Image: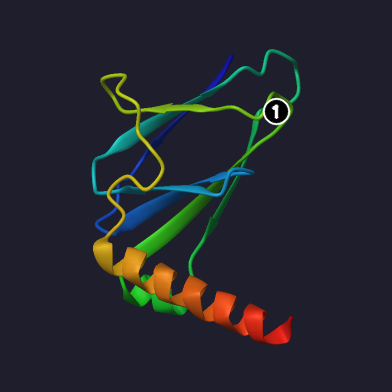
């Protein structure tokens, strides 16, 4: 089993993206998640990339994408106490609204091109 702890030590949001699932978990300062996979080999189980656009940084958001590799496509994500932390954890409502609007616009554009 491979295990990775991720803790937000900054005053910004830390968005932890889990790929290839496309899942997001939003961590406030001091929050930690533990990611477990069934990797038992010698190859690395995780590849980590940090990133943020100028717009995201201005909004107080940093991103960390964790790519799960060399194991089954399953990951267990829990908090310090072992409670499951679901996709969308603490995602701000305004982000949900913005993403829904972008999705609707993309679907509308797609429907016009078919």
The part of the image, by quadrant, that contains residue 19 is top right
Q: Residue at x 48, y 75 (%)?
A: 104
Figure label count: 1
In this rendering, position of residue 82 left or right of residue 113: left
Of 50 and 87, nearer the camera is 87
Is residue 60 visible in the rendered structure shown here?
no
Of the 4 image quadrants, the one containing the N terminus is top right
Specify the quadrant that holds the C terminus.
bottom right
Residue 64 x %, y %? 49, 51
Q: Quadrant of residue 5?
A: top left
Q: Return the x and y of residue 71 as percentages of the image width and height.
A: 70, 24
Please tell me which residue lies in front, 73 or 112: 112
* In the image, residue 31 above or below residue 80: below
Q: Secondary structure at mark 1?
A: loop
Expressed as whole percent of the image width and height from the top left, the position of residue 48 reads 59, 44
Q: Is residue 105 above or below residue 41?
A: below
Report the side of 82 relative to 39 (left or right).
Answer: left
Q: Which residue is mark 1?
A: 44
Residue displayed at 24% across by 41% down: 30
When asked about the image quadrant of residue 39, the answer is top right
User: Does residue 12 appear left or right of residue 69 in this picture?
Assistant: left
Would you call the spot at circle 1 few (<14 residues within 10 Å), some (14-19), or many (20 or more)?
Answer: few
Of residues 27 and 20, which is closer to you in this image? 20
**Which colouring convention does the figure follow?**
rainbow
- Percent across and percent down for residue 100 are 41, 69
Please say if 45 is above or below 13.
Answer: above
Q: Residue at x 66, y 28 (%)?
A: 45
Residue 76 seen from this side: yes
Q: Nearer the viewer, residue 76 or 61?
A: 76
């Amino acid at each position: 089993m491979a295990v990775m702890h991720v803790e937000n030590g900054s005053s910004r949001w830390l968005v932890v993206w889990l790929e290839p699932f496309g899942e997001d978990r939003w961590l406030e300062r001091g929050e930690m998640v533990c990611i477990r996979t069934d990797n038992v080999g010698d190859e690395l189980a995780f590849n980590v990339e940090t990133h943020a656009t100028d717009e995201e940084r201005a909004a107080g958001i940093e991103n960390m994408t964790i790519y799960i590799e060399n194991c089954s496509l399953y990951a267990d994500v829990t908090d310090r106490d072992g409670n499951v932390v679901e996709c969308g954890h603490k995602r701000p409502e305004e982000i949900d609204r913005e993403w829904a609007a972008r999705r609707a616009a993309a679907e509308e554009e797609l429907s016009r091109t078919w």
